[in-house]
Image (cartoon, rainbow, N blue to C red):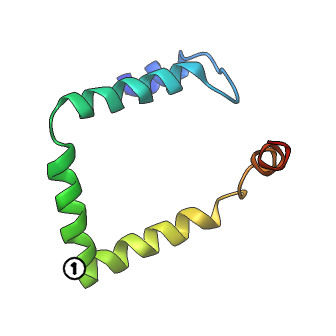
Amino acid sequence: MDKMKEIAGQRNEGEGNRTSAREYSEAQQRFIRSGQVDQKAHEAERDMRDRDIRRELERAATVGQRHSHGEDPEIRRRDRND
């Protein structure tokens, strides 16, 4: 219930939410500093060799892609103008 109060009290920053972007970036930096990057990369390689885990990951990726609106067309415009 406390989490719901916390969420309800957050200001909607809309598209380009700076708070979320900062929190994500900070989490990435903590992960890098944790020294676990190589270990997690090796675990991911191992998981991709496991047929059942690989299928589960591929199914999850497919579900996620169904919700995608595709690549931002602005990216292609920038590439053509460079």
Residue 20 lies, with reference to residue 51, above or below; the image says: above
Would you identify the image quadrant in which residue 44 lies? bottom left
Please provide percent x and percent y for residue 80. 83, 50
Residue 16 lies, with reference to residue 62, above or below; the image says: above
Please provide percent x and percent y for residue 71. 71, 55
- 75 and 26: which is toward the camera: 75
Q: Could you tell me which residue is drawn at 45 percent across and 75 percent down?
A: 59
Q: Amino acid at mark 1?
A: Asp
Q: Could you tell me which residue is drawn at 17 percent across and 32 percent down?
A: 34
Q: Secondary structure at mark 1?
A: loop
Please provide percent x and percent y for residue 35. 15, 36
Q: Could you tell me which residue is drawn at 75 percent across and 49 percent down?
A: 72
Whether residue 15 sits left or right of residue 32 in the image: it is right
Name the quarter where the N terminus is drawn. Answer: top left
Q: To which residue does mark 1 refer?
A: 50
Please provide percent x and percent y for residue 11. 61, 16
Q: Residue furthest front?
A: 82
Name the quarter where the C terminus is drawn. Answer: top right
